């Protein structure tokens, strides 16, 4: 269970996040907002890349910053724009990240192969990353986040640049994984989370607008007495 | 309300948790880093930087040999150049690491792993440091050979001074890193270091002569001990990002 308490983040006086209070239990959380509302900032705080200006994030009651390594062992993070060593092959890159994640050599080799296979990269695993297409790189980014079979998976627009088939495949992987995990999934593509998210988080004006189930959200806006689609709810929220 | 008496396992668990939290086993930071280095391996710590190191040594060695053969230096010039040069390779290598890290943007993922880029940074500082000491040692020997200095204690003194100045610089550098990791600041640090050394040499020659040229070797050894002690306390702060600005590279 992750608890966010009074979290705000300022960049040189500019408030990117203001006073967020909420909780993440098990399940898939779709995080929606227009551009620049603070999704990435929130996820970076959850991944301990940034520390909040005020407030604290707790994992089962313990400050994640205090937990340090112990907390990072539990997470997998996929940044919105992920950097990579251009001269590494996918296999070498994943093995390198596995070392940083503290995974033993034999387990790392096993996990790497399994993930490359699952994400359709096994055939090209020894090609250099600089020869990969955008969508292939995106899948390498997903693979590295899953290496340590994380209990908390933090995904910042993971499907940007994936074709519809890969997107569907990615959804399947997530649903399969989700059991017993907390997945934070930020996206602009509402349909990506509509069917799989347990709850939707919306950010508005740099603060938390709602944390509710998809159905609750759709029922907030009725059209001719019927619940609207998630997409319509999104548009109505930000109009 | 009735509360069930805890089972033996629950009792044992909570005792061990209390002990673990109250007195965490502290491994010596240098031993921890060595273990980590063995785990990650040289090539992955360096990330292609090893390719830059070869031309760097070559240029550096060539420069030293050239200077040795073409410039007649007084003893105090020699001491001054040791002070100026001993942190140079270290500082240059680290700037290159930061440039590479920024350019490739890999740090976002590296920061989210159990061992972060700050662990890598310290390993790199270690490697850059050893490398810097080795290159400077070699340069001194080359210089000594070309000048027929062997036999005197000059080379020994220069070597002691080189190690002391390097360790002092290293310690100051870690302090700086805890405030900010920006490359501009790192370069300013080296620049300031050089200016201060030159100014002391020019305007307070007595102090320069004492500090650089006459300081007893035993005091040098004490300086090494003190700096290593300080580093032992500072390096965990880098790892745990306890700096004033939280060492947040992305901000
Ligand atoms: N390092 C930074 N320095 C200054 N301002 C920043 C920094 N990072 C983010 N911001 C600002 O904080 C706000 C939130 O940014 P953030 O990247 O979290 O938005 P986002 O919801 O992820 O947007 P998008 O949907 O476009 O990815 C933006 O206005 C952005 O300009
Ligand atoms: Mg974003």
Image (spheres, rainbow, N blue to C red):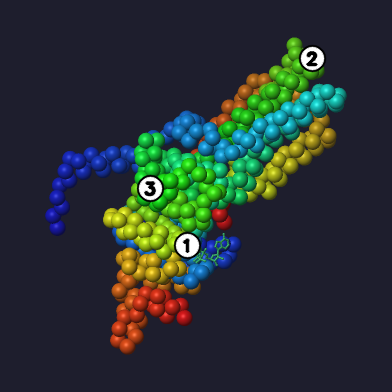
Name the subunit of mark 2: B
Q: Residue furthest top?
A: B151
**Residue at figure coordinates x 42%, y 80% from the top left:** A236
Distance from label 2 to label 3 (Cα)?
64 Å
Q: Position of residue A116 (x, y in %)?
A: 40, 47
**Residue at figure coordinates x 61%, y 50% from the top left:** B103
- Viewer-proximal residue among B232 and B142: B142
Q: Which quarter of the rendered picture does the N terminus of chain A lie within?
A: bottom left
Q: Residue furthest bottom?
A: A224
Nearer-N-terminus badge (3/1): 3
Pointer 3 residue: A117
Q: Would you say the beta carbon of the disc 3 residue lies within 8 angstroms of ligand 2? A: no
Pointer 1 residue: A160
Instruction: Give left or right: position of B174 versus A175.
Output: right
Q: Counting other residues with Cα less than 10 Å from the Cα at mark 3, is it few (<14), some (14-19), or many (20 or more)?
A: few
Q: In the image, which is nearer the foreground, mark 2 or mark 3?
A: 3
Q: Is residue B128 visible?
A: yes
Q: Secondary structure at mark 1?
A: loop
Q: Counting other residues with Cα less than 10 Å from the Cα at mark 1, is it few (<14), some (14-19), or many (20 or more)?
A: some
Q: Position of residue B67 (x, y in %)?
A: 81, 27
- Viewer-proximal residue among B100 and B217: B100
Q: Quadrant of residue B144?
A: top right
**Residue at figure coordinates x 68%, y 24% from the top left:** B137
Q: Which mark is residue B125?
A: none
Q: Is residue A7 visible?
A: no
Q: How many marks?
A: 3
Name the subunit of mark 3: A
Pointer 2 residue: B148
Rendered view: B61 above or below B98: above
- Are the residues under marks 2 and 3 on the same chain? no
Distance from label 1 to label 2 (Cα)?
66 Å
Instruction: Give left or right: position of B5 versus B177.
Output: left
């Amino acid at each position: 269970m992750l608890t966010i308490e009074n979290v705000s983040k300022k960049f040189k006086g500019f408030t990117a996040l203001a006073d967020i209070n909420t909780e993440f239990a098990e399940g898939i959380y779709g995080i929606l907002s227009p551009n620049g509302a603070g999704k990435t900032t929130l996820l970076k705080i959850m991944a301990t890349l940034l520390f909040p200006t005020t407030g604290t994030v707790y994992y089962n009651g313990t400050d994640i910053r205090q937990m340090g390594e112990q907390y990072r062992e539990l997470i997998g993070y996929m940044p919105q724009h992920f950097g990579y060593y251009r001269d590494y092959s996918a296999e070498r890159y994943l093995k390198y990240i596995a070392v940083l994640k503290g995974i033993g050599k034999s387990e790392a080799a096993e996990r790497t192969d399994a993930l490359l296979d699952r994400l359709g990269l096994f055939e090209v695993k020894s090609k250099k990353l600089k020869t990969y297409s955008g969508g292939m790189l995106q899948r390498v980014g997903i693979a590295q986040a899953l290496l340590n079979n994380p209990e908390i998976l933090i995904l910042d627009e993971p499907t940007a640049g994936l074709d519809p088939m890969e997107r569907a495949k990615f959804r399947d992987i997530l649903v399969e994984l989700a059991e017993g995990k907390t997945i934070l999934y930020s996206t602009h593509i509402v349909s990506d989370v509509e069917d799989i998210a347990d709850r939707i988080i919306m950010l508005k004006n740099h603060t938390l607008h709602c944390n509710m189930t998809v159905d609750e959200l759709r029922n907030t806006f009725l059209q001719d007495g019927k619940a609207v689609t998630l997409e319509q709810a999104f548009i109505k929220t930000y109009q | 309300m009735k509360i069930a008496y805890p089972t033996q396992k629950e009792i044992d668990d909570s005792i061990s948790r209390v002990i673990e939290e109250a007195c965490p086993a502290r491994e010596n930071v240098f031993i921890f880093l060595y273990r980590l280095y063995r785990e990650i391996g040289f090539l992955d710590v360096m990330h292609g930087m090893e390719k830059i190191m070869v031309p760097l040594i070559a240029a550096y060695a060539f420069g030293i040999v050239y200077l040795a053969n073409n410039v007649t230096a007084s003893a105090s010039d020699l001491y001054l150049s040791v002070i100026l040069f001993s942190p140079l390779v270290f500082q240059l290598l680290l700037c290159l690491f930061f440039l590479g890290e920024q350019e490739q943007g890999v740090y976002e993922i590296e920061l989210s792993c159990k061992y972060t880029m700050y662990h890598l940074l310290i390993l790199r500082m270690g490697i850059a440091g050893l490398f810097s000491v080795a290159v400077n040692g070699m340069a001194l020997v080359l210089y000594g050979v070309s000048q027929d200095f062997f036999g005197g204690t000059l080379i020994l003194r220069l070597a002691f001074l080189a190690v002391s100045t390097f360790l002092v610089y290293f310690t100051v550098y870690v302090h700086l890193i805890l405030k900010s990791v920006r490359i501009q600041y790192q370069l300013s640090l080296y620049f300031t270091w050089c200016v201060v050394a030159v100014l002391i040499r020019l305007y307070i020659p007595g102090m320069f002569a004492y500090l650089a040229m006459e300081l007893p070797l035993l005091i040098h050894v004490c300086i090494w001990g003190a700096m290593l002690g300080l580093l032992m306390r500072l390096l965990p702060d880098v790892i745990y990002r306890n700096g004033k600005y939280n060492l947040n590279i992305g901000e």
